[in-house]
Image: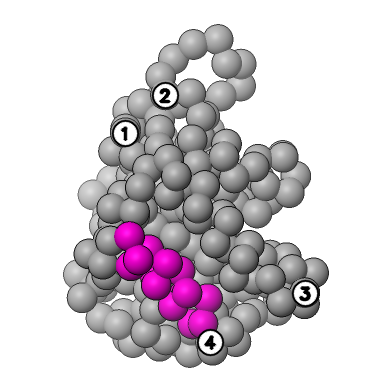
């Protein structure tokens, strides 16, 4: 049985005051750590503050991005995997569609980062997903396959047992439009089958989150699908009440 995993992607939101309030709500309200893994991914500058504020609460911390360079060096503005580890990050989101679209990150660049994260024992949350045009052109699976293949070429199939995948249809991110549970399940099953061709064991262990306008009112239906193991939550992760409701929905249907 896979333990469901819900992560909050705060994107470029937050202030010390806002974070203090959010974490007070989350630490007071989160009671189901035995059945669901939960993480928050703040902007990098707040990682240490979040980690210290969380104390011993059963909520992990992740980063939203990371350098493709494995260690230290002349890479102005970058943050390396060992730096994230030093501040107790467990996860790192890689290949988010905003980084692909706005910052020109391509499949191979993202695959390199996945390898660097794995080498540093950080768990990558690898985001994949198609645009609206790609879905309408009927090439969703081809796009996902290409995004996965770049990572497979670098780290092989077995490594996917230590990778979290977030299927995030680009047209559903921040738009209020969610994939239907059936649409999402179809892509999740495709992803798991693709990895199973290389390693049945990794495919069985691999967590596949759904992301894209997950809200308290649609989380349960999405998480009820057999291959949806949790969610990567943007907007709704900024309100303690909403994020807790989503985490509790995962515990209810999968716990
Ligand atoms: P959203 O974002 O929940 O606001 O749609 C999800 C994401 O981008 O990870």
Magenta-colored stretch includes residue 137: no
Residue 68 vertical position relative to residue 14 in the rendered view, above or below: above
As measured in the structure, the alpha-carbon distance from the residue carrying label 1 to the one carrying label 2 is: 8 Å
Magenta-colored stretch includes residue 193: yes
Magenta stretch in the rendered image: 185-198
Residue 142 vertical position relative to residue 251 in the rendered view, above or below: above
Discs 3/2, front: 3
As measured in the structure, the alpha-carbon distance from the residue carrying label 3 to the one carrying label 1 is: 37 Å
What label sits on residue 119 in the rendered view?
1
Q: Which residue is mark 2?
A: 70
> Residue 237, image x and y in percent?
53, 64
| Residue situated in front as seen by the camera: 153 or 208 | 153
Q: Which residue is mark 4?
A: 181
- Secondary structure mostly taken by the magenta-highlighted segment of the chain: helix
Query: Is residue 208 something one can see in this rendering?
Result: no
Mark 1 or mark 2, earlier in chain: 2
Identity of the residue furthest to the top in this view = 74
Residue visible at 51% across and 29% down in the picture: 68
Q: Which residue is mark 3?
A: 137
Label 2: few (<14), some (14–19) or many (≥20) C-alpha neighbours in 10 Å: some
Q: Quick one: quadrant of the N terminus?
A: bottom left
As measured in the structure, the alpha-carbon distance from the residue carrying label 3 to the one carrying label 2 is: 38 Å
Discs 1/4, front: 1
In this picture the colour scheme is: one colour
């Amino acid at each position: 049985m896979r333990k469901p995993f819900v992560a909050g992607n705060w994107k470029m939101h937050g202030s010390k005051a806002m974070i203090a309030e959010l974490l007070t709500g989350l630490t007071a309200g989160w009671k189901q750590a035995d059945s669901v893994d939960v993480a928050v991914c703040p902007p990098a500058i707040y990682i240490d503050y979040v980690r210290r504020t969380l104390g011993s609460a059963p909520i992990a911390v992740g980063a939203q991005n990371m350098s493709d360079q494995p260690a230290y060096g002349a890479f102005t503005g970058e943050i390396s995997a060992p730096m994230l580890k030093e501040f107790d990050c467990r996860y790192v989101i890689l290949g988010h569609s905003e980084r692909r679209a706005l910052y020109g990150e391509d499949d191979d660049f993202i695959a390199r980062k996945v390898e660097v994260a794995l080498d540093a024992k950080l768990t990558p949350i690898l985001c994949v997903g198609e645009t609206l045009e790609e879905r309408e052109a009927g090439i969703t699976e081809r796009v996902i396959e290409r995004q996965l293949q770049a990572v497979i070429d670098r780290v092989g199939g077995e490594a996917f047992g230590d990778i979290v995948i977030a299927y995030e249809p680009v047209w559903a991110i921040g738009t209020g439009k969610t994939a239907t549970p059936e649409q999402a399940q179809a892509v999740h099953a495709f992803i798991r089958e693709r990895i199973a061709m290389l390693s049945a064991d990794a495919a069985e262990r691999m967590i596949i989150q759904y992301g894209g306008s997950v809200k308290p009112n649609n989380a349960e239906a999405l998480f009820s699908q057999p291959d949806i193991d949790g969610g990567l939550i943007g907007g709704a992760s900024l309100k303690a009440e909403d994020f807790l409701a989503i985490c509790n929905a995962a515990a209810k249907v999968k716990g």
